[in-house]
Image (cartoon, helix red, strand yellow):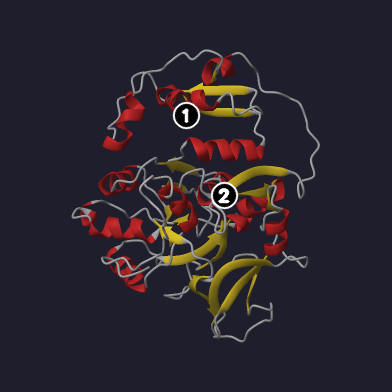
Amino acid sequence: MYREREIEYQIKDSGAKAVMTFDLFYQLYYANLREKLTSVDHYIVTNMKDFAAPDFNPEVLGALKAFWDAPKTKIEATIDLFESIEKYQPTDIEVEIDAKEDLALLLYMAGTTAPEPKGVMETHFNLVYNSMMTPLHPERTKTVDYSIMPMFHTAGYMLLGLPTFYEGGVVIPVPIFDAEWTLKIMQDYKVTVILGPPTLFIALMDHPKFKSYDLSSLNRVIACGAPVPPPVQEKWNRLSPCPTALGAGWGMTETNSPGSGCSWKHFLLDSIGVPVAAEMKICDDESNVLPRGQTGEIYFRGPQVCKGYWNKPEETKETFLPDGWMKTGDLGYIDEESFVHFVDRKKDLIIASGYNVAPVEVENVIYQHPAVLETTVIGTTDLIEGKR
């Protein structure tokens, strides 16, 4: 989904020393950027078929066919991933780290007041803590996790990846969503856990063959990434064989995804649940705590909160307070039963299929057209789903 300008910004901002990519993408983007990306010492390339058995003949959906059909290409001045792996044994080198301070991951997220995305600094402690405290299976038995969220998205790591591995489960990564394909995978692989945006569950229920597939293995479903309409929850709970209700969750890249959620025993429609091994409070613009039921900005505090924004000290200081609280930029309230309710985003982000889209980023692209003098991008109500 990225284009050259986005790739160039993130690599220059991070100071990346190595890039790993498909040979197809290298030819499309990196070959043109190579002279500009002076920090990169190594380009490692691979091909989708490298990861498949020689006789593997899958059903490839239309949107992926171009990637699957792309021939493996030998590219000068690059390193072939699998050829290089075959030459080396696992290293026994030990590296001393400070788990709470040293970075494990830079995850870039959409900006709001500037077109450049922010690099969220995740520490080793962040990733380990979230892996241990994100229960995906009610009984801690083997999890089979259907993963529609990509690895450039925080949910790909902290909802659908590392916690499952910590439990000794299996992740089925799916590169593109197709409703019937998803139903077939859920049946054939006996999927137990699904986390995804509300649109995923809507698409599954609207498919004419929804009732034809055996989904009895499901025991945990969570909608996240966008506000979950209660009618969608009610419909899923009525039609699905899953013994636990479709709950809603809330999280951010800065919180390593899970921040609050509904458990398999305690949930409330139209809420985002309760804090997950953390604290939440509602504050006014002066950071004063508001009474229950009053809407204000959601503040979050817990060991899973990231270290800050890479190369952005002012934004870090503004968002992450000295006492550990993080200003989320989301509006909500806490009811008398301590369930948290999401109301709206304080900033002008537009949500599209669970992803944050900054209006200014869209505007900057439109401005590149020579026929455009001025432009503004605002969120409007979806005429089909009736939501912003």
Going 69% across and 52% down the picture, which residue do you hit?
312
Residue 299 is drawn in which quadrant? bottom right
In the figure, is residue 38 to the left or right of 101?
Answer: left
Query: Which quadrant: the C terminus?
Result: bottom left
- Within 10 angstroms of label 1, few (less than 14), some, or many (20 or more) residues? some
Residue 381, image x, y percentages: 33, 68
Query: Residue 29: which disc?
Result: 1
Count of numbered marks: 2
Which element carries disc 2, helix, strand or loop?
A: loop
Q: Is residue 191 visible?
A: yes
Residue 8, image x, y percentages: 56, 35
Which element carries disc 1, helix, strand or loop?
A: helix
Residue assigned mark 2: 117
| Badge 2 amino acid | Pro
Considering only vertical position in the picture, is 76 above or below 295? above
Residue 106 is drawn in which quadrant? top right
Residue 227, image x, y percentages: 43, 67
| Badge 1 amino acid | Tyr
